[in-house]
Amino acid sequence: MASHVVGYPRMGPKRELKFALESFWDGKSSEAELQKVAKDLRISIWKQMADAGVTYIPSNTFSYYDQVLDTTAMLGAVPSRYGWNGGEIGFDTYFSMARGNAKLPAMEMTKWFDTNYHYIVPELGPETKFRYSSHKAVDEYKEAKQIGIETVPVIVGPLTYLLLSKPAKGVPKFELMSLLDAILPVYKEVLGELKAAGATWVQFDEPSLVMDLEAHHLEALYKAYSFFGGLDGIKLIVETYFADIPIETYKTITKSKAISALGLDLVRGTKTLSHVKTHGFPSDKYLFAGIVDGRNIWATDLAAASTILNDLETAVGKGKVVVSTSCSLLHTAVDLVNETKLDDEIKSWLAFAAQKVVEVVALAKALDGQTDQAYFAANAAAISSRKTSPRVNNEAVQKSAESLKGSDHRRATPVIVRLDEQQKKLNLPVLPTTTIGSFPQTVELRRVRREYKSKKIEELEYIQSIQQEIAKVVKMQEDLDIDVLVHGEPERNDMVEYFGEQLQGFAFTVNGWVQSYGSRCVKPPIIYGDVSRPKPMTVFWSKYAQSLTARPMKGMLTGPVTILNWSFVRNDQPRSETCMQIALAIKEEVEDLEAAGIQVIQIDEAALREGLPLRKAEQVHYLDWAVHGFRITNSSIKDTTQIHTHMCYSNFNDIIHSIIDMDADVITIENSRSDEKLLSVFREGVKYGAGIGPGVYDIHSPRIPDTEEIADRVRKMLAVLETNILWVNPDCGLKTRKYGEVVPALTNMVAAAKLLRSELASAE
């Protein structure tokens, strides 16, 4: 019997690491105090898995910020601007790379494949000097060994590391894979030190192997793992996840003599079993079978999973299958035990990370002929209950969604005509300024929401408190002379959870937190049934905010694709069907906002790119239904109502034509942290006729850019975009920042816009 877990959540069951990190960053606690919290969490996780009976327990999956950044530290690939002069990389350098500091910008952050987790993008060049500079993998292996637990150290593999990197700013374009020879000796040095410490297995995470790789990538793959041959006593697991491996990649990696095991995703890798049966599996290797879903919270159908595992063992050989999770459990909530308020029936349908560990061990025992009959019977009852529960299905919603087929729901008037009509009504200046939606969530604001939710204060007191906050934010924006205002979203806990709480078909957790980046956690809603909107969700607050000002006030909504991609989604129907149901609910809200006099409505689709399938052959279908879902939300409104959307922290250049096809009037989009990468698509000749606001400063860093820096960014935009379509705005919402950072940054942003208006007027 053999079981394995790819990785585990780091934040802790009650977000202990989040609070320790933020306390340290605020100067309220010491480095030693942060390290103690981290060590306690690691030991707790290892003991939990050991007690459950997991055979291959991972280590080095803990991180103070991000596992790719940890690999950058391990390789000593620190960008020169951080002034690191060698030696073991400490917190000052590490967190400066992650978050920036008062003087230096952070490294770029973007989405980890098709998840809502963000990684720090390595910045490399032909002259980058690689050297072993962080012994974290070895230190954590030794830490576990000291308490009597043998672990499998986990490291981001060399191919994935290079494929996720980018050329450093100012470096001419070059082939990143040309650095393979430079990084492999460092990896081998790490393996040697792990071997000396007693490690017998090491896991290299190579999720890039599920992508469409070119021939030279496959050559590099074979070369890399051949290089690791000869390390007697160390067995390598190459772990893949998020999709099935293309055939040529599968053939390349399975013929490598240096690896002892290959991890395959059997959940999202729908063709994996077929690949193994058709092309065989080497008799000298183990297959780590990712059968327990690491990206969702539904209980595994143990009977169905056992059938697949038995089928796989028949193809691979007795004793050669190790039962595993489909990917790291980083992407799911920590422990269902902490959910004391969840409905009992729905709770019986779920499994969080702690429960998934138990599922893995139970399936491994069953594969070995030791089935826990009572556990399997309880699981079968829960699976049956979910299939037959009347609360899952709503016939009226299903009929409404079905009726959407056959129309593309595009607004009848072209966007260039709509913009003219909107300008007549809004009368905005050249380079209009706005923000993305949220303003800082203060301690007092969180207290008010918490006390209202726990019924410690009356509804009237809550409404008055929120209205006071809205009035403060509106006046602040007027004082700053921002052109299109927002109400600041003080009533909202999260841009997805807030809407899910008001829609039918959603359930919510108390502690179902999932790491998004750094210390930032989200609590995804659970979509368990058909979705509908019982009543308006935002109209009351938006109407109040608009009553306070003569300037346009944006109604703020989260789009259907983002609600879908940032929720734990039901897995009993296609995601596209759930998306259409959500789109209809948001459409009703858009119509109500317009009827209430809101002239500008923002429908955020921050996660559109995130849901893009990793394989090109599957991308067109996704983009078709995702873009259609967005268009449904605003297909019935007047030409004079201006529709905005927002996207952030992904590479959008390859889907720019789909973004244009969304047919929004204005799009605001992350730009500053990625070195204006977005602008390159316009330099290459893509014509964009709608309004566009590439972000002018990074809100995820405490650094405050000055007026000239922002003005210079906008000048670069004006070189490739028409003056009459360009907006000036931050990269993202301001929720995570402090007012002491927000006010000076927005002051400088508005000053930059005014400076450029003067320059443009003088040039006429």
Image (tube, rainbow, N blue to C red):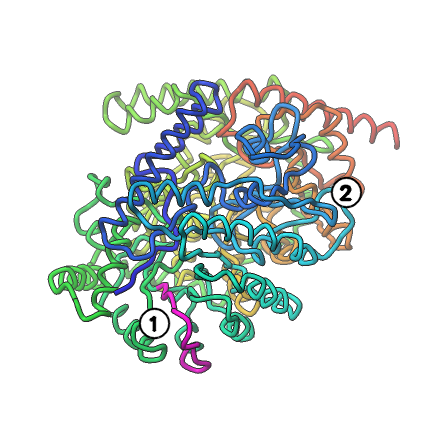
Q: Is residue 307 above or below residue 125?
A: below
User: Which three-letter amino acid code belongs to the residue tagged 1?
Assistant: Lys
- What is the residue that sits farthest to the right in this orientation? 763
Which label is found at residue 216?
A: none
The answer to whether any part of residue 147 appears in the image is yes
Q: Is residue 538 above or below residue 507?
A: above
The magenta stretch spans residue 157: no
Q: Which residue is mark 1?
A: 320
Taking the image as shown, residue 756 lies to the left or right of residue 185, namely right
In the rendered view of the protein, which quadrant contains the N terminus?
bottom left
Horizontal placement of 516 versus 352: left or right?
A: right
The quadrant of the rendering that contains the C terminus is top right
Q: Which residue is mark 2?
A: 170
Residue 240 visible somewhere in the drawing: no
Measured from the top left, where is residue 472 in percent x and y?
Answer: 49, 18
| Left or right of 624, for residue 324 | left
* Residue occupying the point 34% across, 72% down: 320
Image point (31%, 26%), residue name: 450
Name of the residue lying farthest toward the left: 374
| N-terminal-most mark, 2 or 1 | 2
- Callout count: 2
Q: Any magenta on residue 277?
A: yes
**Where does the magenta region start and end?**
276-290
Q: Position of residue 11 (x, y in %)?
A: 38, 38
In the shown orientation, is residue 624 left or right of residue 16? right
The Cα–Cα distance between marks 2 and 1, rounded to whole angstroms, is 49 Å
Outermost residue toward the bottom in this view: 278
Residue placed most toward the observer, 738 or 364:
364
Q: Secondary structure at mark 1?
A: loop
Q: Quadrant of the rendered structure where residue 148 is?
A: top left
Observer-nearest of 144 and 49: 144
| Residue type pointed to by label 2 | Gly
